[in-house]
Amino acid sequence: MATQSVQVRSAAGAYRVLYGRGLITRAGAEIAALRGHTGVFLLTSPRVARHWRGRLEAGLRGANRRGTVLFDDRESAKSMATAEKLCRQLVRAGADRRALLVAAGGGVVGDVAGFVAATYLRGVRLVHIPTTLVAQVDSAIGGKTGVNLPEGKNLVGAFYPPQLVLADPETLATLPRREFRSGLYEVIKYGVISDLRLFVFLEKNIERLGARERPALDFAIVRCIRAKAGVVGRDERESGLREMLNFGHTFAHAFETATGYRRYLHGEAVGWGMIAAVRLAERAGLFPAAQAQRVEALVRRVGPLPPPPAQKPEQLIRIMGADKKTRGGKLRFVLPDRIGHVETVSDIPTRLVRGVLLNFSARAASTARTRLQADDSRQ
């Protein structure tokens, strides 16, 4: 497949998302064409550097690379403290107001490095090189940046579009299976919210995607990139339409927060969140039961998920109250009315939400009992 170019509209100026094999080795030429920067600083994680640092640094030779800064890309390290540490390292490395930051990694790297780019010296230029499936289809596109607080996920951040996104699917070859599966849940999300053709393709080909077969990957990733570009180009700052991209995320963010960002990869939380959302939509009479079953079945075919959260529904509902979509203390959910279309709904009775969450906590308790019995049998 030849390199694909998708343009994303932004108030700060349009930028391109390039998708193609070998883009890492051509990154320097693509970035050099941006012009006007005083030096490139590569921001990545030790995990990404272990596989790709050599090729990344070699690819940036023609773009005046000034240094490489490594930082922890675990969700639990996506914090103000990490952002401050990065800013101080950039000061010591001599990054000025015309510096250009290259964020190479997954969603955490992109979110934190993007937040640093938005705030360091009141804003420096940014390029994303997403190396995970989640980042290539979703988080690297659209300019959302941010860090977590103990009270909730992504509560501090900025809308800050990059100058360029370079998505090279060759980087997906080194992803652990669990991380790759985590990205597939975000791919499913796009099928549910806006693309029935993609959803049907996934129902027929999810195992091929799981096996990382090239034609299936190319079709799904490019389709997701075009979908994300279309949404954020019309609603960059999440004033309405862009909320559809949060399908499953109101539940997912609560699950991540309640478990201290340590149990789930983000996509796994989204997997559970989508299951919860379609169950809620079905209970509310918005979504046909047969279609809810199709969505849940597809999510479960991706692979095993960590156990659902065991916290009481009241605790999870309280965490949801801090969600960015909440208005006037009322929870708002992105829910499907058919596969391929969703709406933001604000009048869902709390008892229905509690009922969905009770089912999750009961399943978690059952899983814990099963494990305890298995442990007892080995003693």
Image (cartoon, rainbow, N blue to C red):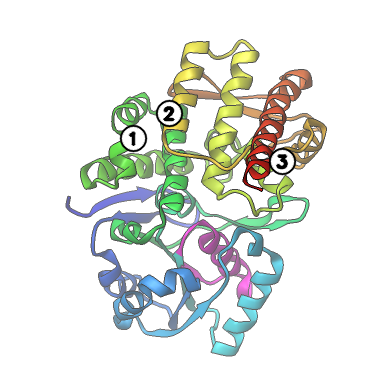
Q: What secondary structure prevails in the magenta region?
A: helix
According to the picture, the residue beneath numbered tag 2 turns out to be 298
Residue at mark 3 to residue at mark 2: CA–CA distance: 26 Å
Q: Under tag 1, what secondary structure?
A: helix
Residue at mark 1 to residue at mark 3: CA–CA distance: 31 Å
Q: Residue at x 31, y 41 (%)?
A: 209
Image spot of residue 79 (x, y percent): 68, 64
According to the picture, the residue beneath numbered tag 1 turns out to be 206
Q: Amino acid at mark 3?
A: Asp
Q: Under tag 2, what secondary structure?
A: helix
Residue 119 among magenta residues:
yes
Q: Residue 176 appears in which quarter of the rendering? A: bottom left
First to last magenta residue range = 105-126
Which is nearer the eye, 127 or 292?
292
**Residue 323 - label:** 3
> Could one spot residue 71 in this view of the protein?
yes
Q: Amino acid at mark 1?
A: Ile
In terms of sequence position, does the residue under pointer 3 or pointer 2 come before the other? 2
Image spot of residue 120 (x, y percent): 61, 73
Q: Residue 363 appears in which quarter of the rendering? A: top right
345 in relation to 53, above or below:
above
